[in-house]
Image: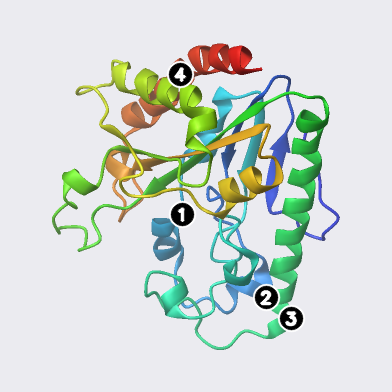
Amino acid sequence: MDERTSTDEVIWRLIKGDGPLVATAVHDGHDSREEVIRHYALDDLARLREEDPFTGEWTQIAPTRIIGTHSRFEVDLNRPRDKAVYRVPADAWGLQVWQDDPPEEIFARSLATYDSFYATMHKLFSEYSESGGKFVVYDLHTYNHRRAGPDGPEADAAHNPQVNIGTGTLDRTRWAPIIDTLIEELHKYDFPGGRLDVRENVKFRGGNWPRWIHEQFPESGCAIAIEFKKFFMDEWSGEPNRQLVNAIGDALRSTTPAVLAVLRELH
């Protein structure tokens, strides 16, 4: 079922299912409120480059799914509240987001949806925690690796793995069996073109969204930031390689039986 917020415009979808596995794609969205769009200096394609297309599709691996529907340029659900709206280029990879100075009321309405999102998520995860159960969150993201331009070189693979597992916001000792199992299962999946390069905390360590889960639910919640390099698409045109997009979904799905088995042992 979809769960609605109390705000006028919903910026996420929540599909609630059974079981302790949750998949989230908070940067999948590309929509924005009309009052926000009027102030953008960036066009659709420029915004899409910094969003995480196809992550919402990959959440189908889990019974409970949380998918952002609005652009991170409207409000970023993976940043602390005081950084959740991009005001200056330094907040947005040096990009000039706004063609003018939007009225403060616009930012306030964006932050109201941010607050509503986190209030709804607290209610959701409290249901797991209050029942004494543990839950695992696959926090799905993508990242760019051709920032020098469409014809520029790829970023050095030594520092840009195909899959970055971000565990910097959780208690590694407590959740080691889950993390190690996820990495092992992803690495051994028979991926087109060869095994995936899966490494931990090389490029990213996890953002505010998993950090918040661990702060609020330290005993019960294990949120792992899973970042896929955009090797499965042209990050400048937005054109996907559907074989690789589908294969990533299959690879993620292949990890869930073993991860859930370990979670049951921990429980």
Amino acid type assigned to the residue bearing label 4 in the image: Thr
Q: Residue 260 in the image: x percent, y percent?
A: 57, 16
Q: Is residue 193 left or right of residue 44?
A: left
Q: Residue 148 in the image: x percent, y percent?
A: 20, 63
Indicate which disc, 1 or 4, sits on the residue closer to the N terminus.
1
Seen in the picture, residue 244 relative to 86 is either above or below; the reply is: above
Q: Is residue 244 left or right of residue 136?
A: left
Outermost residue, bottom side: 101
Cα separation, mark 1 vs mark 3, equals: 24 Å
Amino acid type assigned to the residue bearing label 1 in the image: Glu
Identified at 66% across, 69% down, the residue is 34
The residue pinned by badge 3 equals 105
- Secondary structure, mark 4, is helix
The residue pinned by badge 1 equals 51
Categorize mark 4 by other alpha carbons within 10 Å: few (<14), some (14-19), many (20+): many
Identified at 44% across, 70% down, the residue is 92
Indicate which disc, 4 or 3, sits on the residue closer to the N terminus.
3
Query: Which of label 1 and label 4 is nearer to you?
Result: 4
Residue 244, which numbered label? Answer: none
The residue pinned by badge 4 equals 255
Categorize mark 3 by other alpha carbons within 10 Å: few (<14), some (14-19), many (20+): few
Asked whether disc 3 touches disc 2, contact meaning CB atoms under 8 Å apart, the reply is yes
